[in-house]
Structure formats: C-alpha cells, structure tokens
Image: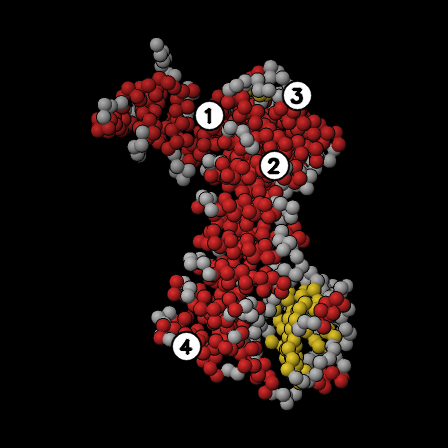
Amino acid sequence: MLQVTEGCPKHSVLICVLFISGKSKEAEIKRINKELANIRSKFKGDKALDGYSKKKYVCKLLFIFLLGHDIDFGHMEAVNLLSSNRYTEKQIGYLFISVLVNSNSELIRLINNAIKNDLASRNPTFMGLALHCIANVGSREMAEAFAGEIPKILVAGDTMDSVKQSAALCLLRLYRTSPDLVPMGDWTSRVVHLLNDQHLGVVTAATSLITTLAQKNPEEFKTSVSLAVSRLSRIVTSASTDLQDYTYYFVPAPWLSVKLLRLLQCYPPPEDPAVRGRLTECLETILNKAQEPPKSKKVQHSNAKNAVLFEAISLIIHHDSEPNLLVRACNQLGQFLQHRETNLRYLALESMCTLASSEFSHEAVKTHIETVINALKTERDVSVRQRAVDLLYAMCDRSNAQQIVAEMLNYLETADYSIREEIVLKVAILAEKYAVDYTWYVDTILNLIRIAGDYVSEEVWYRVIQIVINRDDVQGYAAKTVFEALQAPACHENLVKVGGYILGEFGNLIAGDPRSSPLIQFNLLHSKFHLCSVPTRALLLSTYIKFVNLFPEIKTTIQDVLRSDSQLKNADVELQQRAVEYLRLSTIASTDILATVLEEMPPFPERESSILAKLKKKKGPGTVTDLEEIKKERSSDMNGSAEPASVNASAVSTPSPSADLLGLGAAPVTNSAPPPSSSGSLLVDVFSDSASAVAPLAPGSDDNFARFVCKNNGVLFENQLLQIGLKSEFRQNLGRMFIFYGNKTSTQFLNFTPTVICSDDLQSNILKCCSMCLFLLGFCGLLLHNIINLFDRGTMSLNMKK
C-alpha cells in the first residue's frame, strides 16, 4: 500500500491526479476548466490563504500546464511561496518558476531578490533550490545578478559538498549561456584544487566546469593537468570496492574517468616526465582492463567499461606521441570491428579514421583493410557503412589506392542515396591524389560518371578536364577513352560534357583512326545534342566551332547544323547567340584568325583542388586529408583551377594574331622602369631591385630552357610564389611569344610590372611588345601575360620587378 504524508511532494502530485483525472478527453478538459475557475476564485477572493493551500493550488496549475494547457495566472502566488520557510512550499515555488516563468518576465527582479535571500541564508537546502532555479532559467538577467556571487560560494571553505556540486553546475550553465558575464579572477586558481576534493561528486561537477572553461582559457587552468592525472590514476588503479558509492556495475567512477580524460584532451602531453609517465601508466591500465574478461554479463557493465576505453583512446589519438599506445589502441579497435553491437562497430570505425592520420599508427590501421571492406559490403546499418567509407578514405595511400577506389566504386552502385555524392567526391580525390598512371585516373573518373552520374558535381568533371589539359601524356588516351564511352546507347549528361570538352581540344589526336574520324566524332556528339540541357548544348556548340578549326574537311557539315532553324531561331538566347556568332566566325574568319581564336586551352595554374574544397565544405574541417600533405604529394606538373575557362572566354580574351600581323610597321613599345621594391619585401629574392639586372635563374631552370628545343610551350620558371609560362608560335620569319605570369600565393601582388631585357640586335627585331591584362593579378592564382612579336628567333632574358 502506498502511504503519502501531508507535506510530502508526492502528496501534492497525488492530489493533482485525483482532482484532474477523467474518463475521457472531454471529461478531463471539463474538469480542468472547472478547477482553473476554482483556483482563480481562491487566489482572488481568499486573501488569507495559508502556505499549504497556496502550494496545493500552484502545484495543480503546474500539473495542468504539463498536461498541455496554457496557464496565465498564479505566477505571483508562486513567487510568494519562495519566501516561505517550509521546504515543500519553497520547492513548489521554485519548480513553478523554473517551468513557467519566462526569462523576460517582469517578475524576474522579485525572483532574484528571493534567490539572493536564500543564497545568503547559508541553509544548504535552500541554497540548493536557489542554485537549481538559476541553472534552469539561465537568463542573462540572472547571469548579471549572480555570476559574481556563485564562484564565491563554490570556493568557500565552509560550503557543503552538495552546495558545491550545485554551484559548479550552475556556474557552468551561466558560462554557456552568457560567457561574457562570468568574470575570471582569483577563484579560477582555487577551483582547480577541487579536483583533489574528497567528495567525488564535487570532483565530477568541478571537472565539467573546468573542462568548459579550459577550452576558452587554457592558460588559466593549466595546473589542472597534473591534478587530473593524479585523480585519474587513483581511480584507475582502485578496486571496485574502494569507491562503492561511485562504482557502476564493477567499473569505478566511469563518469568521472570520462570527464577527466576529456579535460586532458584540452592540453598537449604533459611536459613533466613524472606526470607524463603516470598518465601513460593510466592509459596502459585502461587498455589492459579492456582485455580482461567481463565481471558482469549485463550491458551496463560493458557500456561503462567501453565509455572509459573509447575516451582513453581519444586522448591517445589527441596526444599522438606514444607509438606503442597508438598501435595498441588500433589493435583494440580492430577487435570491435566485428563486434555484434552496432554502436561499438560504429565507434571503432570512427576512432580508427582519426588513428589513420597518425604516422605511428597508419600502417597498423591498414592491416584491417579487409575487415573494413567486408563491413562495407555486409553491414546493414547505413551509418556504419558511411563510417567504413570514411575509414577507407583515411587509410588510403599509394600502396592500396587502386584496391580501395575499386571497392568504393563497387559499393557506389548500391550505396544509400544520401551518401553517394560524398563517396563520389572521395573517389575523385583519391584517384587524383594517388594516380601513378593518369590513364587509370581517366578511366576511374569516367567510370564514376557512368555509375553515379547524377551525383557527380561540376567540380569533379571540371577537375578531370584540368588534369587532361595540363598533362600532354594523357591527352590522346583521354580522347580515345571518352570517344569510346560516348558510343554507349545511354550516356549521362556529365559524360557528354567531358566528351565535348576533351574532343573539342584533342579530337585531332585520334582523328587518324578511321573508326574515330572527324565526321564520326561530330556525328557521335551531335546525336546526344537533343537529349541535353541548355548549358550542355552551349558547350557542344563551342565544341563544333573548335572542330571547324581542327577539321576543316567537316566545316560545311558543321555550318549546316549552325545554320539550321533549330539553332538560329532557338528560343534560348544563349544558344541562339552562340549559333549566330560561331556561324559568322566560321564564314568570314581566315585560317590564321580561326587558329588563334580557337587555339588550344593553356595549362591551368596550380591551386587547391576544387573537389577537396567541396568535400571540406560538406564534411567540415578536420574530416579530410590535410591540404598541405595533398599539395606535397601531388605531382608538380599537375595544375588546376576552380573551373575550366569556356571557349567563349578564350575567344574574347585572346587577341587575334592577324590584327597584330597587319600592323607590322608599328613602333615597338618602350617599357618604363618600375619603381624599386622595398628592401623588406617578401619577394626580394624573386624580383630584382634593378631594372638593368637580370633576375637569377632558380635551380633547375636550365632544364626548363632545354624543353623549348622541341616544344613551343611550357613552364619557364616556377617557385612557391610565381609561375612563368611561355608559349610561342612562328610563321616563316614572323614569330610571337606569349609570356604568362601566375600568382601562386594567397595574397595580392601590387604594382606588378614585367620587363623584357634583351640585346640591341634583338631589340631591333621586336616589332611589338604589349602587355595585356587578362585578369587582375592582385587576386591569387590569376594571370597576366605579355605578347612579343619578333622578326626572327632569338634569345632573351626576363627581368621581373614588383
């Protein structure tokens, strides 16, 4: 039989249930309305209500509110209960305020006064109720009123342990909601010593507070490291019987252990050898206990034990300084990869993703590759499969790249739709980063488009085009492969885009094969034209005009297509304008003009992969491979930009050589000497201070000059700040040189002036030297180039100044 005495909180709740319970929803609402009317009349009519009756009616209002009904009165009566000296009345008043009073209420000042009285009473019970109310409401007004008072209560020597716990958690709540109102002072050094308190409840609450404060003010709480290690050591080495009140299913103080381990993750490894050795012993003990047989078969025991283990592994990964511990942690996680508990498999995969980034444990993680691949194929939970993909991505290197990429492509065909785009980005990044043979890279990206074309973003197909353009050795293979891929009856539109771009640039490399003659290439692309969207059709029209330059024999066929009503009278303005302009260009332009306007795209300047940037944006920082490592491992010949420039942009920006050749009698342009750069400039070693001096060549530049014996274009000079490219063309005794300057830094170049220095004999042969600004050099990665017209071939040296 349930016995409830008057004055007990259960008594008030039981009264509410008996008064309000009904047989149906309608009966309950009727009873509630009747009760609300009765309570309102009692509050208005009876001015001499005793504390018990007031508490009873306020409790009823609270219960009615919890049932989902609005309460618009009774707040003042609840505030009046705070002045009572009886615990149950004060408790109901604080409970009502914590639940129903808005932080912007006009009653906050009255409530604050009552709270101040309770905090000053030194009655631990009343102080606890007041601190709970402050934490529950957590308004800015309360933070302004009590943020300076609560730290004093926390560190006072005569404060009860239960009040210290409440004060620490209350201060934590206020710091999270209004960190600017919690003052740092002398109490910060004293609160650290609470980690040595005999009461583990106080230590647990203080650890939560110190961890949050240390994340924003690490220097203030640096002394907590040694105290945390000392307390953790005592817990780990103790038996379950030593901490009976804080032992949970044979695991000593698991919550406190986890909090201490998290606090230590706010700091680097301890510098004191004694403290560091003691911490290492603690971590080894935790790893050893994980190997011991369980002391209970209940799930609570394994949960508590594994919580401490995973937090210890997180600390080992954070410190990343003990190879032995990292390998042991990896092996321990490897045992969880095949555990029957889904949560453990998930956590193991997640932790191993971080371990894979450590130089000490990367090889140990790679030993579990078959298990991870098997999880990718058989795991039923999609979130676990996603973590398996993340781990494969993290453990990938040159030794296993092809295997991992192949497995991810196989999984992509059946992958959950929510993670397909992410897998596509990761496959594209791995294929680029670890490509030894770029024919494999081209095959992989085309296969990626075939399998998951809808999830291949623009960044992916932009990137493959950039790489193909920048690498002469793969251009012919790319043209052949994409031509064969386009022959499939159903091609994704992204494949058509890639095919149109690559064949427009390099279709001539496979035109000698009768199976891929110019006409066949054109017919193949045009057969896809009506199935594509407007942007893709616009790209294909640009490809057609490129074909006019590459394959004059099919010029008439292409002109017929451009001249058709479906193009010249197209409802889309962009397609109509392109058709009209391209038709007119192919009709009136000479061969030389076409060759210049429609010349091959120049190499793209090197910069961060746009695919990597997209994955970083999608997943957040810290989840992809470090950008600096990618830049180091990426081939120096591989350049890229955010997206390839369109043919139209090339046609507009590139000057016509015919226009220059028609003005052969023009006087040469004399370059004025730029002002000298400041001696403190970062570029002092790259740019000469004297207009007459020739900039010294960087090591290996002689090799760059040698390549121009057989080639008309390439990189002339390159370092971490600047890339200079040279492109030349000659017709009989006339020549032209394009000199490109690329800013590779993340800062702006100001007042950049290139100057050509050459001998008097050569100077007389320079017909025209002009500097055309394609883009503003001030922005990183963009280009400036010089155009120099020559009578005859000659040698010259370049002097560049800032």
* Residue type beneath disc 4: Asp
The residue wearing badge 2 is: 368
Question: Which amino acid is tagged 2?
Answer: His
Quadrant in the rendering for residue 295: top right
Other residues around mark 3 within 10 Å, as few (<14) / some (14–19) / many (≥20): some
Q: Which mark is residue 237?
A: 3
Q: Amino acid at mark 1?
A: Leu
Q: At x 57% / y 71%, what residue is drawn?
A: 600
Q: Which residue lies at the image location 34% right of the left edge and 29% below the top edge?
A: 66
Ranked by sequence position, the earlier of labels 4 and 1 is 1
Query: How far is disc 3 from disc 2 in space, using C-alphas?
Result: 32 Å
Q: Give residue 328's position: percent from left, percent from top.
A: 66, 31
Q: Looking at the image, tell me whether mark 3 or mark 1 is earlier in sequence order.
A: 1
Q: Dot 4 corresponds to which residue?
A: 560
Nearer to us: label 4 or label 1:
4
Q: Residue 110, can we see it?
A: yes
Secondary element type, mark 1 = helix
Contact (Cβ within 8 Å) of mark 1 with mark 2: no
